[in-house]
Amino acid sequence: MPIKQVPAIAIDIGHSYLKIIQTGSNGQINKFVVHKMPEGCVDDLNISSEETLIESLKKAKKESRLPSSKCILVLSGSDIIARHFTLPKLDEEDLYQNILHEMSGYLPVDPEKYYVDYKIAETVEEDGVQMYKVLVTSASKRIINGYKKAMKAAGFAPKIVDTSENACEKLLRYNNQVNPEFSIEGGVCFLDFGTKYTRANLYNNGLYYVSNDLKRSSQSITEVIAKVAGKDILTSETLKRKNDYLSGTHENEELSKAIKYEIDSLVFEVSRVFDYFRNRTKNTINTIYLSGGGSLLQGLQPYLEQHIGIPVQYASGLISRDNVKKNVDTTGFGILLNAYAATYREEL
Ligand SMILES: Nc1ncnc2c1ncn2[C@@H]1O[C@H](COP(=O)(O)OP(=O)(O)OP(=O)(O)O)[C@@H](O)[C@H]1O
Ligand SMILES: [Mg+2]
């Protein structure tokens, strides 16, 4: 199933930043905005303050001078449940009934309260019988409808809801499609350093496999700085962005040590997810791609590479240079990755 670049607007609503991107017909980035939202607007996909969210969406829309056209909403979080099932090749209706039946066991409450969607990832043969391997995604209707309502109130027309897991899969496969030398064989991991979580999305042979929300995040590093340096959160946030605590020796050795300890704990969490992946798939993770605002932490890329022992790259490198307007520095584009990846379309 080929992946295509199409003109689109995609919105990624995180715990602290709202990211909007508009792409053109060959995937070039025409407009983008990274808008800081007031604290406590959303929490684990729940909208804590609808009014504040609408206000932020309106401001970001105005800032980017976007039209009120249709857009894609990209979400991620442990409340979005994605599972693989291998099911007999059935007609559409019977397949969907089977999927609902299989998925109901994974849903914490009444299945009626969930949207359930699926895609056929591949056709496999089991004991001589052709089977579909389907990726099923479900999300609470309350959550999805809440976001749609807020977006409509802010002048957007949400048409598609995507997940970061699926969006990054499209990005990986697109890169392989246009450049077969870009290998997607074996395991690939996207590490999205968000405010509240570091999300690990793992892919096997170019197909989404599993994801996990890890507790150590960009915010935990700010908190470590606040605690060890005895500073307020705002000052700690500035210090975090300004200094390289990870490479070489830092004048404040105690602080540098504490931050390294936090990253080492994250590395431990990551390696446990990798162990799970290796045991299940018998494949190893070959590359790690860093995204999210927290990936901009100075010295993080070489530190992770050294401590995990796997090539670590910035996911912004997967956004082709041709797709970025001239003279734009793409280093910081990792923060836009989920939104950018969601603009790709998968031909079914
Ligand atoms: N230059 C920088 N250096 C270090 N950290 C940075 C930098 N710029 C932004 N960050 C951090 O990135 C985080 C925000 O990133 P991002 O927008 O990806 O998170 P989010 O999507 O809002 O959160 P989540 O994914 O948890 O919902 C903040 O914690 C911020 O401190
Ligand atoms: Mg995020």
Image (tube, rainbow, N blue to C red):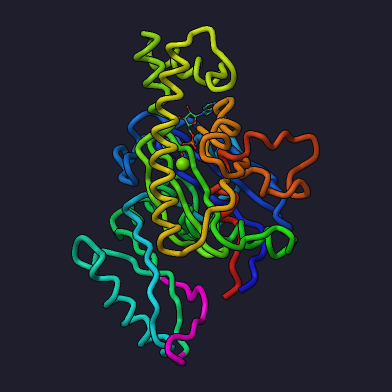
Q: Residue at (73%, 64%) from the top-left corner?
A: 180
Task: Please tell me in which quadrant of the rendered image residue 236 appears.
Answer: top left
The foreground one among 67 and 266 is: 266
Task: Please tell me in which quadrant of the rendered image residue 107 appears.
Answer: bottom left
Q: Residue furthest left?
A: 109
Magenta run includes residue 2? no
* Magenta region, main secondary structure: strand
- Find the magenta span and give its range: 118-129
Check the picture and name the quadrant holding the C terminus. Answer: bottom right
The foreground one among 218 and 345 is: 218
The foreground one among 209 and 64 is: 209
Rendered position, 89 above or below 49: below
Query: Residue 72 appears at what percent x and percent y?
Result: 52, 56
Q: In the image, 276: left or right of 296?
A: left
Residue 282, visible in the rendered structure: yes
Residue 65, visible in the rendered structure: no
Q: Residue at (56%, 14%) from the top-left corner?
A: 249
Q: In the image, 265: left or right of 48?
A: right
Query: Residue 273 appears at what percent x and percent y?
Result: 40, 50
Q: Residue furthest right?
A: 326
The foreground one among 336 and 9 is: 336
Rendered position, 60 above or below 228: below
